Amino acid sequence: MRLLDTIVLIASLDPKHPLYGRAIKHLQSVRSPDVFVPCVVMHECELVLRKKLRIREIDIERIFQNLTLMIPNAKVVAADAETHRIATTMSIAGQDRGGYTDTMIASMAKQHQAEVVSTDSAFRGMGVRTIW
């Protein structure tokens, strides 16, 4: 199983982004039966668009309309009580190096024995395999 990180969504939105080509391929891979998007990635994507990139709401709405076409609801993995238990255990052990969202993605990866599609090295520090 593979879980897409937020960088896949963000980079796939801008053809000028240096990771655009690979990001689009990873986003298209969500059609594969073993590729999913954690719910926290959708949330973080919206936060990045609003707060960091200062994208207008009308444009964010359009972006998510397009993402809805590319990422069916069945491909979005929800966090459950076990996900939060694993994240809390990681935090207690000092393995929450990437912040809340990365810790939640890492805990989902551990829960589902998945690898994370990301360029973020913080995941390796949390004991999660990454690919790009």
Image (cartoon, rainbow, N blue to C red):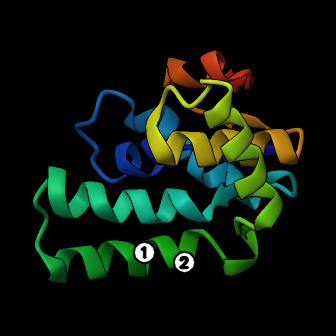
> Is residue 129 left or right of 132 when viewed as pictured?
right
Quadrant location of residue 37?
Answer: bottom right
Pointer 1 local density, CA inside 10 Å: few below 14, some 14–19, many at least 20:
few
Would you place residue 96 above or below residue 72 in this image? above
Query: Who's the residue at 70% across and 56% down the image?
Result: 84
> Is residue 19 left or right of 27 when viewed as pictured?
left
- Disc 2: which residue: 69
> What's the amino acid at mark 1?
Asn
Quadrant location of residue 126?
Answer: top right
Quadrant including the N terminus: top right
- Disc 1: which residue: 66
Query: Could you tell me residue 120's position as x and y percent?
Result: 49, 25
Pointer 2 local density, CA inside 10 Å: few below 14, some 14–19, many at least 20:
few
Could you tell me if residue 132 is visible in this image? no
Query: Who's the residue at 40% across and 48% down the image?
Result: 12
Query: Could you tell me residue 103's position as x and y percent?
Result: 58, 40
**Disc 1 vs disc 2: Cβ atoms closer than 8 Å?**
yes
Helix, strand or loop for disc 1: helix
Q: Which mark is residue 74?
A: none
Compute the Cα span from label 1 to label 2. 5 Å
> What's the amino acid at mark 2?
Leu
Query: Who's the residue at 19% across and 75% down the image?
Result: 59
Would you place residue 60 above or below residue 88 in this image? below
Query: Could you tell me residue 14's position as x and y percent?
Result: 27, 48
2 or 93, nearer to the observer: 93
Could you tell me if residue 44 is visible in this image? yes
